[in-house]
């Protein structure tokens, strides 16, 4: 889709032009105003506007600010779910260090073998390994137009190293979105978080009224529960979050680039909040 200029798009008043419920909800939730464009296939301003277009327009606006996004928060606050939505809508890569490690475990690479025992116990993989991995990923061509980091940085040392990598690779300062959810809700969510083996979609048994025996609602693939989402490991992961990861918040707060959003509600509601926070970042 090419950027085009158009009429002044003014959010809720023009919501009737939004063809998809997701697009309407995003506009309602965020109260955003942004330029809207006539598309080639839609010369008469018919109501065919889809959520991708809404978010794409916003993405263009945001590009002037920063499409280098860090999603921060405890395990289970919904970073992965939001990262997938934003990555698709903005066409930028979703870099999940947890996913990279799980892929390495699946392929039984030396990194995977080293990471597996730590991950199974809810512990962190050593900083030097994670920092090297992120330097390579951010230096690759696919991150040139922006990226969404999910699960990195997770320690103060990783945050400091990331500042250095940004400087070294001439990457603009990131927008850091801190997603917050009550701990009881996190524990409840993780105990029923199911992931699709095929498409990676994340679902919640309670919210989506499904069990592990049901197929993925997106692609029909087989669902599984992550080993580290079992109760004992979740407790350890939350302890690690409080001890090692929470200080990262102060790192970005002191730079004035951290925005906090409430992570309770529907996926679309939270996407709306994240977009608003990005716009203000
Ligand atoms: P996640 O999928 O982000 O919940 O990560 C799953 C697990 O991967 C974590 O519990 C850690 O063991 C490991 N991991 C992911 N990202 C990092 C990181 N930045 N630093 C250290 N360990 C990580």
Image: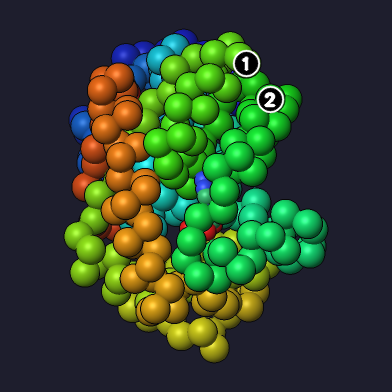
Marked residue nearer the N-terminal end (1 or 2): 2
Compare residues 26 and 200 and report the one nearer the observer.
200
Residue drawn at (51%, 84%) of the image: 212
Residue drawn at (27%, 32%) of the image: 250
Tag 1–tag 2 contact (CB < 8 Å): yes
On screen, residue 156 versus residue 96, left or right, reads left
- Counting from the top left corner in percent of width and height, residue 210 is at 43, 82
Q: Residues within 10 Å of mark 2 (few under 14, many from 20)?
A: some
- Counting from the top left corner in percent of width and height, residue 46 is at 43, 32
Give me the C-alpha separation between circle 1 and circle 2: 7 Å
- Counting from the top left corner in percent of width and height, residue 178 is at 30, 40
On screen, residue 277 versus residue 49, left or right, reads left
Residue labelled with disc 2: 139
Is the residue indicated by label 2 positioned so its CB lies within 8 Å of ligand 1?
no
- Confirm whether residue 9 shows in the render: no
Quadrant in the rendering for residue 249? top left
- Counting from the top left corner in percent of width and height, residue 131 is at 59, 36
User: Tag 1's secondary structure?
Assistant: loop
Compare residues 124 and 105 and report the one nearer the observer.
124
Compare residues 16 and 222 and report the one nearer the observer.
222
Residue 109: mark in rendering: none
- Confirm whether residue 175 shows in the render: yes
Quadrant in the rendering for residue 35? top left
Residue labelled with disc 1: 169
Residue drawn at (53%, 20%) of the image: 164
User: Tag 2's secondary structure?
Assistant: helix
């Amino acid at each position: 889709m090419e950027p085009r200029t158009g009429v002044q798009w003014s959010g809720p008043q023009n919501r009737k032009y939004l063809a998809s419920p997701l697009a309407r909800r995003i506009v309602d939730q965020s109260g955003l105003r942004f330029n809207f464009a006539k598309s080639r296939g839609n010369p008469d301003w018919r109501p065919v506007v889809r959520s991708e277009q809404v978010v794409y327009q916003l993405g263009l606006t945001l590009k002037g600010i920063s499409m280098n996004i860090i999603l921060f928060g405890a395990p289970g606050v919904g970073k992965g779910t939001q990262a997938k939505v934003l990555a698709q809508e903005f066409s930028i890569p979703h870099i999940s260090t947890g996913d990279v490690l799980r892929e390495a475990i699946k392929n039984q690479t030396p990194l995977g073998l080293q990471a597996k025992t730590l991950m199974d116990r809810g512990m962190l993989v050593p900083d030097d390994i994670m920092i090297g991995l992120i330097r390579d990923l951010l230096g690759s061509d696919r991150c040139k137009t922006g990226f969404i980091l999910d699960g990195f940085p997770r320690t103060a040392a990783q945050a400091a190293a990331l500042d250095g990598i940004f400087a070294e690779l001439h990457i603009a300062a990131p927008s850091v979105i801190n997603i917050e959810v009550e701990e009881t809700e996190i524990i409840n969510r993780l105990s029923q978080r199911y992931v699709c083996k095929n498409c990676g979609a994340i679902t919640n048994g309670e919210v989506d009224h499904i069990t592990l025996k049901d197929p993925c609602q997106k692609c029909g693939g087989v669902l599984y529960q992550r080993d580290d989402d079992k109760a004992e490991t979740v407790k350890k992961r939350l302890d690690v979050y409080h001890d090692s990861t929470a200080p990262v918040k102060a790192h970005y707060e002191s730079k004035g680039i951290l925005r906090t959003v409430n992570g309770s509600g529907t996926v679309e509601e939270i996407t709306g909040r994240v977009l608003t926070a990005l716009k203000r970042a």
